[in-house]
Image (cartoon, coloured by chain):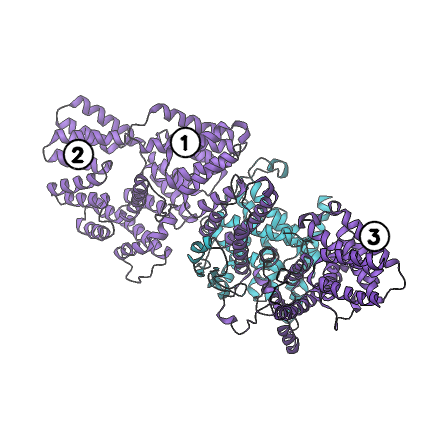
Amino acid sequence: MYNGWCKMEQVLVQGWLSEFKTLPETSIPDFAAKLHKKSALQSAIHKVLATSQSELLEPLCHQLCEFVRSGNAMLYRFTLQFLPALITCLLTARASRDPRQACGSLEALLLALYNLEICNKDRSNKSFTIPSLSTPSVYHEGGNMGTMEMEPALTGHEATSQAFSGSLCHQETFTAQNRFDVLTFLLLCYNASISCMPTSSYLALCSMCSRVCVSGFEPQAQRWTEPRSRIALTADFMVLMLMGIFHSMYVHTSAPTSFRPSM
Amino acid sequence: MAGRRQGARFEADIERCRTESQWEKIIDIVKQFNKLVGGDEVGNLYLGEALLELHQKEVSPRDMSNPNRMSSARLTQAKECLKEVLKQKSLKEEVVQEAMLIMAKLHYLEGSAKNALSMYTHAHLDEINLVSAPTYKIRMLAEAHAIKGLCLQEQTLASPSRQTIREEHIVMCYEKAGDIALLYLQEMERVITSSQNRSPRPTMLATEQELGCFLEVALQNAQIFHIRNGYGTGRLHRIEGRMDGTIARQLAEILLRGICEQSYWKPLEDPPQDPPPTNSQQEDQEKQKPFTRARASVVHSLYCPQDNTEEALLLLLISESMANRDGVLSRTPEHNSDRMLSLQNATVIYDLLAIALGRRGQYEMLSECLDRAMKFSFEEFHLWYQLALSLASSGKASRAVMVLRECIKLSSDDPSIPLLAAKLCIGSLHWLEEAEKFAQQVVDLGDVAGEFQAKGHMALGLVYSLQATDEVNFPSHLLCFNFSSLNRAHTLAPEDYKTSFYLALQLAISRQIPEALNCTRQSLQLQGDNMDSLHLLALLLSAQKHHQDALNILDMALGEYPESFSLLFTKVKLEALCKGPDEALLSCKHMLQIWKACYSLSNPSDSGQGSSLLDRATAEKRHQQFMNLPDFSDPETGSGYYSFYLEWKVNETLHTYLFSPAEVYIGIGKPTEALACIQEAAGLFPMSHHVLYLRGQVSELRGNLDDAKRWYDEALAINPVHVRTMQSLGLVLQRLGRGGLAEKVLRDAVRVNSTAHEAWNNLGEVLQVQGQTCAAGECLLCALELEASSPIVPFNIIPRTL
């Protein structure tokens, strides 16, 4: 039965992979425009990515890699929605004690995404400002905010501009040292366009977070049969994970919680 | 005749009172009038309205969300009155309409949105004409639209497909409410100015700008819908004059959780896909905004947020300052509920601030904000803990530990808090005694600690291990504790690579090499690419004199961590030993190049090793981060020992890495090149014992023993426990013919570090010359044994942090 639905997804993804290969150059924009509507395909791809050691992983990554390189914004966005699933793949493959789990094409895809994004001037040269109440803004007049006792604290800092992230360099290979630099930056990019993602992507994000957190701890015994070790995460990566979860927690309450008069 | 005149006066009085919202007065007037003239249906309407308004004023806003607690005598009375009015068929249409609107509000207050909505349908709310309506009626209508919106929002819909239609409907209601409210405010202003002209008594100041809570909420909700659905933010200006803490906070909440950078647009720009408003509409709006300042012209000089986090941050800072200003702090019982409310409000704001600032890594600012929250947070665990975490994240470790101590008091059975404190104490503060206490607290919790129990034992073991390294006369029974703690941690959490790693490290330090190798392998099985484990493995192999294997492991580790200086340093040492100095110097150069590339130094001078050294000064700040060492600028670091320790630690790491070329030159007997390196380094560290030691080495190499002794003495004056200086000084003294002093120095050296095989060896040689052959033999044997298990670089080079 498990194999049954698995086959179905596989057939769907396989068909889609070969469809793209036979596509003439001119009809690619058309193909790209229709992609985001194919929710069955999206969840099928997620299933394939969630199945460990699927033989489709390699060609799938290869194709997504081509999407990234094509420079088509729609294709790029389509690829980005699988980022949580791809990160899960990479981290769990690293954590599994089975050295056979090679993920060359997966790493290549993630690096391609990363190297494309760091070239994106908008993002890499971005700085941000920490607002200060002593500077008047579109929302308030400077100076009339806060009580006397707070003044020293407020006048203490002006609106300051700071670099968003340190200069990031082009990466050729994945190493233990740069792995989380790359993944953190990719997750940052994902979070920056998180509200455009479909539901299946949020699900994958949440499952990625829970998997990464329980791997190697007691509860995993019920979930995975093969032994897995703990995954050491960096603090920045965890902050971004939480940001993503925070967003996906609220994204489907389309209206603000109806609040009667309060305060 | 008299009745009619009275009637006219009555009407006028009532209208004025309704405009001024003087409800008690209305009740009096109606009662008086009823006494004079007898019952009147319209009088019932006024009475009903007045009773309802009074009721609404009376109940605190919080109860309003709970309809069951809302019933009161007034409400029932008001209902009776209104029912009476609605029964009458003969009344004017306008009066019936008003009665219906008031009834609808009553229904809503009772919690029946459905009845309220049907009332509005009956009253044909949407068709009521505003032209030349009295002021009170304008307000009534604005409120009616607002309540209608609220009712619609409360309704649950069966099919989600109608959700968008409904939302549009709600927003329409709110917008109408907002528009009419503006009209009302405008009218009110006119009335106020005219009445002030007539009489100097400012009768209406109290009601000025008072919109009533329904309108406030409607405006807030409308705002949030706009933000969510991408309607025009031009609407923001409508209420900017009335920006209050709640709406600022709610807007921030929406910005943080519903909007991402891609879907964000700036407050003064039109949102994407929104049809641009026509000019006449805008002008209309401008005219209608007596209370909002026309800011379009000055907008350029104002700060305007560039992304959603910035906007959220600004809004949160505004609402924070308001929450701080309006917060209720009094602890008297009668203020209890208000205090709880302002605490709740503050907690929400500070949590949102944590989210917004956390996104940008601005933990220092977060800790400043939370500092201001401290006035709310007497015995409030959450705010204390947030402060502690923000302090820890911004590198103010000593204050963080103090705050954590308070947190432990408030929540004594949470193992993670003392564990965090222990981590800070071990890691950046090096307060080992404190760390021991905290770790002991975790261990004392026993099974309550759950997963953290193993970590507690590990922390305890680490503290003992660090104490053993620091202190010359470390009591040996503590060393036993050390092993038992680490072993306990290992049995409790066999799947944690860190426990086996630290056990291995401790075994290695006490020179139980084969056992240590086993443990390291275990740890590597759990975490194959952990740098410290790989490094330890290489060192252990070098201790067993399998230098080539060690080099292979190092190369592999360097593949994963190409920029790790400690790995490169070990590699340089190993290469100098088994491949000769040329290879080692190549590695040195590589190391310094990486150093340069790593810190993207500004000075583009030649790639010689010297210039790289000079650039170090600019990179020092970043280097500290790389080494996981705390910030020197921490103003609270009171104890002199602490700063001394830090300086010593930073210098130690820097020396080991940056003096390696000089050491290699000394090793191959090239004093001139070595001196060049040292002189360059001396410019950076004039007070470094390591520079002085190396100068001594060069002098020794040149055969200038007196100079060498002088340098060594100076080095020891700065760092009296530098074993390498001591062992060199011992030999120099011996060669200068001062055997007694040499013996003393070398005995000191082996006391400081009993595993320094070179010091034992030198001591043996000195004793031999002095004729103490027996003792010399023992020393040399000892040196031999130690050498057999001595790694290429001391095991201590591997950092021990929790």
Q: What amino acid is labelled 1 in the image?
A: Glu
Residue beneath disc 2: B730
Instruction: Give the residue displayed 16% in from the left and 23% down from the top.
Output: B773
The picture quadrant where one finds residue B250 is: bottom right
The alpha-carbon separation of the residues under discs 3 and 2 comes to: 107 Å
Residue B674 visible in the current orientation:
yes
What colour is chain B? purple
Residue type at mark 3 is Glu
Q: Residue at the location (55% across, 73% down)?
A: B296
Of B127 and B137, which appears nearest the observer? B137
Q: Is residue A63 left or right of residue B389?
A: right
Q: Residue B436 bears which disc, if any?
A: 1
Q: Which mark is residue B766?
A: none
Classify mark 1: helix, strand or loop. helix
Horizontal relation, residue B450 to residue B6: left or right: left
Percent across and percent down for residue B638 are 33, 42
Which quadrant does the C terminus of chain B fall into? top left
Q: Is residue B234 above or below residue B212?
A: below
Secondary element at tag 2:
helix
Amino acid type of the residue tagged 2 in the rendering: Gly
Q: Residue A38 in the image: state x and y as whole percent.
A: 70, 60
The outermost residue toward the front is B2
Q: Position of residue B79 (x, y in %)?
A: 81, 52
Residue B497 seen in render: no
Query: Where does label 3 land, which residue?
Result: B80
Sequence order check, earlier mark of 3 and 2: 3
